[in-house]
Image (cartoon, helix red, strand yellow):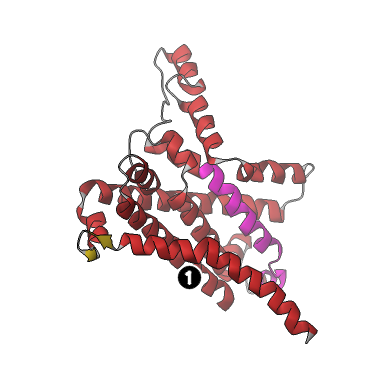
Amino acid sequence: MKGKFTKVSFVLPTMILFTLFFFFPLILLALKSFSGEGGFTPENYILIVTNKRYFQAMINSLMLSTIVTVTSILIGAIIAFFLARTDFKGKNLFITLITFPVSLPGVVVGFMIIILFGTTGVIPMFTKMITGEALGAIAYTITGIFFAYLYFSIPKTVMILYGAVVEFDPRLEEAARTVGANEQQAIFKVVIPTLAPVFVSAASIAFSTSMSAFGTAFTLANQFEILPILMYTEYTNYFNIEIASTMAIVVAVVSLVLNLFSRSLMEKG
């Protein structure tokens, strides 16, 4: 009886919070996204694909998130394996510095990119002193937002992969070496395939974060459009609640599907 009461006392508040702050708002967004002049209609979703501006923003978001995800997984995996397999003085400090960007708001990251790569930023001004021409002014381009997203995606990837690599059963790797595999072969043929669900989980988090990030994009995305910025513009400038809700649902569905997929892989693993 006591155990049942404990479960109820834990599950009930969780379900209430989930309903109030996730399920209920999501239902309202979904209803708005299917609203039109003719009542209930899918025309807003059709418009996302047929309207050149909306469609390009969606493609920009998908491409940017994909490139950020792949790059952060590659770099994050190298750092995670290095930290998990190497002991050195100041390692804890190094891990703290690597993961520090996670605590920074997106707007701060955006301003850091502007300070470094803005029109009058440190890098352009330095190159102008050396070569006479300001180079590297990428702050307001898609390249600038790529580096900004990468800045906060890599630490998350490292944190996820590091724990998995540390907990990896070394006996599996040793078994591969006993049949002739060298260290690199053991990593690529045993360790990485075994940890594939963790890699997928890290990738889904990196992708979802990039798809929905707003603060950094709001600071830097002046020369191109992505879904979070267009969503904000449609709502605040034009009060186009239906289209803004549709974009929000698209981002939410993409993130939800990826998280469910990674969770299923983690449970199978």
In the rendered image, residue 172, in percent from the top left (x then y), is placed at: 67, 73
| 58 and 15: which is toward the camera | 15
Which residues are the magenta region?
150-175
Q: Residue at x 70, y 46 (%)?
A: 95
In the rendered image, residue 238, in percent from the top left (x then y), is placed at: 30, 42
Residue 160 falls inside the magenta stretch: yes
Q: Residue at x 56, y 66 (%)?
A: 18
**Label 1 belongs to which residue?**
261
In the drawing, does residue 73 fall left or right of residue 247?
right
Crowding at mark 1 (Cα within 10 Å: few <14, some 14-19, many 20+): some
Residue 96 visible in the shown view: yes
In the drawing, does residue 115 fall left or right of residue 232?
right
In the rendered image, residue 267, in percent from the top left (x then y), is placed at: 58, 76
Q: Residue at x 48, y 49 (%)?
A: 71
Locate the N terminus by quadrant. Answer: bottom right
Residue 125 falls inside the magenta stretch: no
Q: Residue at x 70, y 61 (%)?
A: 166
Q: For mark 1, give the secondary structure.
A: helix
Please state which amino acid type lies under the numbered disc 1.
Phe
| 29 and 92: which is toward the camera | 29
| 210 and 76: which is toward the camera | 210
* Image vertical order of residue 200 relative to residue 240, above or below: below
In the drawing, does residue 71 fall left or right of residue 142?
right
In the rendered image, residue 263, in percent from the top left (x then y), is placed at: 54, 70
* Image vertical order of residue 228 relative to residue 12, above or below: above
